[in-house]
Image: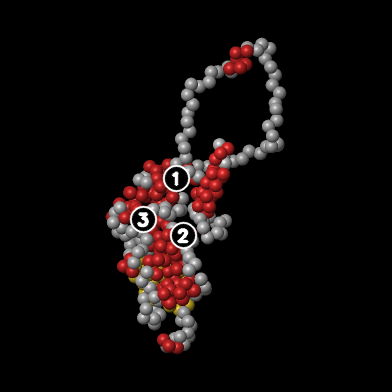
Amino acid sequence: MKKLSKTWWGNRFIQALEAFSDPSRLSRGRSYANSNRILQLDIIDSVIHAKVRGNVNPYFGVYKEPTYNIEIVIHPISQAQWAAGIAYIASKASFISKLLLNEMPDNIEDAFQTLGLHLLPKSKLDFETHCSCPDWGNPCKHVAGVYYRVAKDLDRDPFLLFELRGLPRKQLHAELAKSPLGQALIAELNAEASAPAPVSSYYTRPQLTALPQEINPKTFWQGEKPFPKTVEVLSPSTVSGILVKKQGDFPAFWQKDHSFIATIDELYDRIKTKNRDLL
């Protein structure tokens, strides 16, 4: 079956619903997510609210096209547990660098498993669903359609998952930015690049310089000032390839189903491997 989400976290989000739901309802729900059936979708106080356009169904006594109200509540992580989780994440460069660059670390669940928690929902115990339609099944196709749509939104905005678990993205960003690693990364992200200077030629043009009346051979070859005995070593970047990673896995110009960053990583690996014998 074709994946409905571009990212691993979006697919994991979907798997939690598919693990305990009726396959036939899920199939119809997928068609709802990819059509204009979802009229409105909002997330208020970590709760998903949606309005979905239903079908005429005389079997259920529905003779006019209805609009159903859907509510999905993903059980939040407590503030005390969030404080512990953020402290752990902020101490790991691999976690904090990706999160501040709008990426989801592949091993993000490790940070929560250490505390006996999980960020992504795993079973029906993690959330509650409700729909105003007459279908006795829960989740119904309308709930499934909204759930699949939220999974697509997670592809573009992984911070939405933190919000659904009770931590607003601004608060998460602010807490991570307070840590030493976060401060270093934010400073580098905010660093302004120097503007390009216009030139009249692509090539360096030689300039004539008048020679002094008397030339000292030692000064000519060694210079007027001695070379420094030590050279200051520039500190390496906090995050490798930061210019490529600033826009995350799916920047606005990237329309593919796979990660832009992963594609660039593979390209660089191929270049290094192909030219290894020349280095």
- On residue 260, the disc is none
Q: Residue at (55%, 59%) from the top-left corner?
A: 256
| Residue displayed at 37% across by 61% down | 120
Q: Which residue is mark 3?
A: 109
Query: How dense is the environment of label 1, judged by Cα within 10 Å: few (below 14), some, or many (20 and up)?
Result: some
User: For residue 7, which numbered disc appears in the image?
Assistant: 2
- Residue 172 against residue 69 in the figure, above or below: above
In the rendered structure, which amino acid carries the disc numbered 3?
Glu
User: In the rendered view, would you say 36 is above or below 275?
Assistant: below
Q: Is residue 217 left or right of residue 263?
A: right
Considering depth in this image, is 1 or 89 the residue closer to the camera? Answer: 1
* Place of residue 127 in the rendered image (x, y in percent of width and height, measured from the top left): 34, 68
Q: Furthest-front residue in view?
A: 277
* Type of amino acid under label 2: Thr
Q: Contact (CB < 8 A) between labels 3 and 2?
A: no
As helix, strand or loop, the secondary structure at mark 1 comes to helix
